[in-house]
Image (cartoon, rainbow, N blue to C red):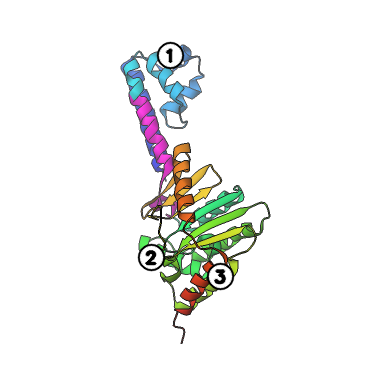
């Protein structure tokens, strides 16, 4: 299945071919003019290779259409955006497992993960049954195959990273997530027990943002920061993978401002315990 990124790259290649044909040139002519192998010209035109800005500038000049340079750069920028915007429809077409395997690899290659969750417990801290309910509910919502067993296995395997002495995890969880219950009460109780026990463990920092806390910055949506190289943001329809320096700095500032208002250690446990006590398990 073609991805959004590949479709956009093919469109850019088609525009390169169009400019060449309009100039009355063959692919070998462009290759000779630029000192490129003909295979590179073919790959660019067929959407098999992503051009650089320098490639596009050279192409526009080789076909005698320097005015097209800005247009081509704009198409490349759009292509970059397609890499950032990853639709859930395409990512989850075969179920949840593939995306969870990506999460495992991202975690393995990261030293410090910071995150904010607004209405759910972070995946790295979830119990198998809590995770299973989330996967099954999401599969029903999106009308995709249920692969909850494989997805849960991958999520639990990802949690092995919590015991890696080379890694650090710093998470903020809004108090609402302790009460927002999309699972049976006994599953939620087990989940809150696990979160309670994780508070204070070495290399795992869990801060709870209380309902009444005064915030310098509101918490509009969840996001995860992987070292200082990547921010992943989830929306209902897609994920945003942001790796620009300005984006990362902005999300770091948001995380730091929110962290100022969080409760840690015994106070965090007290908030989790209060939510646990509110469950009616009679």
x 55%, y 55%: residue? 170
Residue depicted at 40% across the width and 40% down the height: 82
Disc 3 designates what residue?
A: 196
Decide whether residue 91 is among the magenta residues.
yes
**Position of residue 212 measured from the top left corner of the image (x, y, whole percent):** 40, 65
Residue marked by disc 1? 29
Counting residues from the start of the chain, the first of labels 1 and 3 encountered is 1
Q: Residue 42: give x, y in percent of width and height.
A: 45, 25
Density class for disc 1 (Cα within 10 Å; few <14, some 14-19, many ≥20) is some
Nearer to the camera, 86 or 121: 121
N-term mark: 2 or 3: 2
Q: Of the residues under marks 2 and 1, which one precedes in the sequence?
A: 1
Q: Of the numbered discs in the image, which one, if any, rests on residue 140?
A: 2
Is residue 116 shown left or right of residue 63? right
What residue do we see at 41% from left, 27% from top?
A: 45
Relative to 110, is 208 above or below? below
| Above/below status of 85 relative to 216 | above
Pointer 2 and pointer 3: residues touching (CB < 8 Å)?
no
Vertical side of 241 occupied by 186: above or below? below
**Closer to the eye: label 2 or 1:** 2
**Residue stretch rendered in magenta on the structure:** 71-93
């Amino acid at each position: 299945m073609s991805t959004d990124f590949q479709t956009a790259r093919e469109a850019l290649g088609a525009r390169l071919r169009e400019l060449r044909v309009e100039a009355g040139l063959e692919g070998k002519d462009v290759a000779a003019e630029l000192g490129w192998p003909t295979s590179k010209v073919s790959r660019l035109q067929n959407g098999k290779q992503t051009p650089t800005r320098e490639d596009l500038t050279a192409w526009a000049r080789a076909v005698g259409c320097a005015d097209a340079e800005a247009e081509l750069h704009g198409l490349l920028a759009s292509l970059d955006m397609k890499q950032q915007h990853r639709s859930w429809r395409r990512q989850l077409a075969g179920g949840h497992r593939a995306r969870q395997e990506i999460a495992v690899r991202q975690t393995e290659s990261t030293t410090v993960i910071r995150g904010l969750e607004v209405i759910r417990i972070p995946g790295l801290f979830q119990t198998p049954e809590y995770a299973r309910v989330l996967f099954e509910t999401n599969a029903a919502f999106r009308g995709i195959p249920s692969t909850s067993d494989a997805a849960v296995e991958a999520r639990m395997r990802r949690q092995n990273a919590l015991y890696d002495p080379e890694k650090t995890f710093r998470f903020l969880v809004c108090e609402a997530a302790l009460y927002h219950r999309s699972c049976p009460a006994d599953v939620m109780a087990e989940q809150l027990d696990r979160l309670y026990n994780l508070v204070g463990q070495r290399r795992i920092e869990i801060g709870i943002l209380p309902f009444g806390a005064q915030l310098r910055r509101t918490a509009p949506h969840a996001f995860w920061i992987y070292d200082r190289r990547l921010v992943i943001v989830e929306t209902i329809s897609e994920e945003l993978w942001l790796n620009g320096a300005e984006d990362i700095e902005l999300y770091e500032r948001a995380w730091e401002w929110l962290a100022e208002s969080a409760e840690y250690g015994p106070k965090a446990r007290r908030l989790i315990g209060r939510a646990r006590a509110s469950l009616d398990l009679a």
